[in-house]
Amino acid sequence: MAVEKKPVLTVKNIRNVNMGNILQSIIRSKSTTRSILAKENHISLMTVKHVVDDLIAAGILVEKESANSDVGRNPKVLEIAENYGNIVCVNLTSEDEISFLIYDIYERLLRERSIPLESERTYRESLSDVFQAIREELETISTATTGMAVFVPSAYDEEVDLVNYDLIPDFKELHIRELFENEFGINNILILHDVFAAARSEYDSLNPEMESQFYFYCGYGVGGYFIHKDEAVAGEENMAGEVGKMLITMDGNENRFTTLEEVVSISAVKRTMKEAGMNLHFSEMLKLYQENDAQAVQILTPVLNTVSKVLYNLLWVYNPTRIVVDSCKSDYCRIITEHFKAFMEEMKNDAIPIHVQARNAKYDEYHMMRGCFYMTRNAWIDEIADSI
């Protein structure tokens, strides 16, 4: 086995790390002193001075008199300059609408809008409407835009600037990063696979740097992502999260293969409901299932069995500390998790038992795009450290 090479530490690398840590500390506290920064980041006051002086000279930080009213001389405090900043998060994962959120750098939500997709307009035309709406909202905000995150429903190839278009066909030949760069003229634009961003958000929520997590999403698409010791496993072509493309057999017919997504996604279940003459909303069917309605149980039980078997098999591939289940429909998420826990209980007497913590997703990533926000803010901080 090849020995992993450790990165070579240079003065520039160390300085960048210190600068990044200092900026993160100031953002967390909003206002702090040089001495606190030194203690928090385990560095000398002289190192803090060099970094802070550079950030002040670049206009990133400002130093003010403390508002502390205690007796004695008030220490000076450091803050991010008022003109920084805002981060725009755009959700392109739905076939029905395009939504966007604008946060300040402290994660306070400033604006939120959704633009319905009209069938007579192309996706590119709809994006133009969204660009205009974003510009209108940004004109009402006094701070500079420090970055943009674009949430997409499948793997993104950075080299060719294209998204896998199996879920939204209009992504074919649509160079999303180039479009956003041309429209807004900023470099810090991240195109993020929705499953990766959600998995990252869930992983970071518990700060378990030495743990591993498999995140499983089952909505209108199906995907997953494995993070081990803070490292996301994307695969050679960034396709490692595409578990919805796994081939499975149905109805005991060894010759009838289909993909997992074609069986367990919300779209697939809705097709089965329609074929069975069940003309209800998906949420209503889930409620009937929980009430033990015979038709709902008949439709959903094979789906849940399939999901549980796939998750069980993934345990043997990845052996994660925990599995996080998510969906755009919270009831579906809970039902899948409960069924999988019951399945694991049945399997506990296997000759070689395997254990995992299974839970529902903690965050509504598909609405709030929290993981996108954090990754974009971190990219902005890295950009500052590299440029000063």
Image: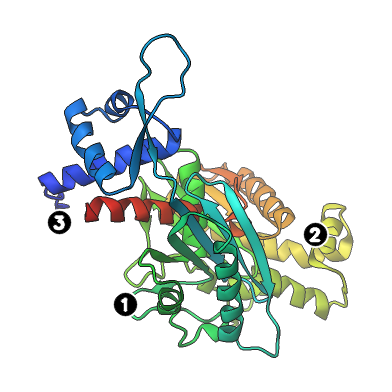
Quadrant (top left, top right, bottom left, bottom right) of the N terminus: bottom left
* Element on which disc 3 rests: loop
**What is the spatial separation of the Cα atoms under label 3 and label 2, in whole angstroms?**
50 Å
Q: Nearer the viewer, mark 3 or mark 2?
A: 2
Residue type indicated by callout 3:
Ala
Dot label at residue 159:
1
Q: Residue at x 47, y 84 (%)?
A: 174
Instruction: Establish if 33 lies above or below 19.
Output: above
**Residue at label 2?**
286
Residue type indicated by callout 1:
Glu
Residue type indicated by callout 2:
Leu
Marks 2 & 1, CB-CB < 8 Å contact: no
**Badge 1: few (under 14), some or many (20 or more) residues near its Cα, within 10 Å?**
few
Q: Would residue 208 be visible to someone looking at this image?
A: no
* Element on which disc 1 rests: loop
Q: Residue at x 53, y 61 (%)?
A: 89
**What is the spatial separation of the Cα atoms under label 2 and label 1, in whole angstroms?**
42 Å
- Residue 359 pos. (x, y %): 60, 44
Instruction: Establish if 376 lies above or below 36.
Output: below
Q: Would residue 218 be visible to someone looking at this image?
A: yes
Instruction: Establish if 319 lies above or below 37.
Output: below
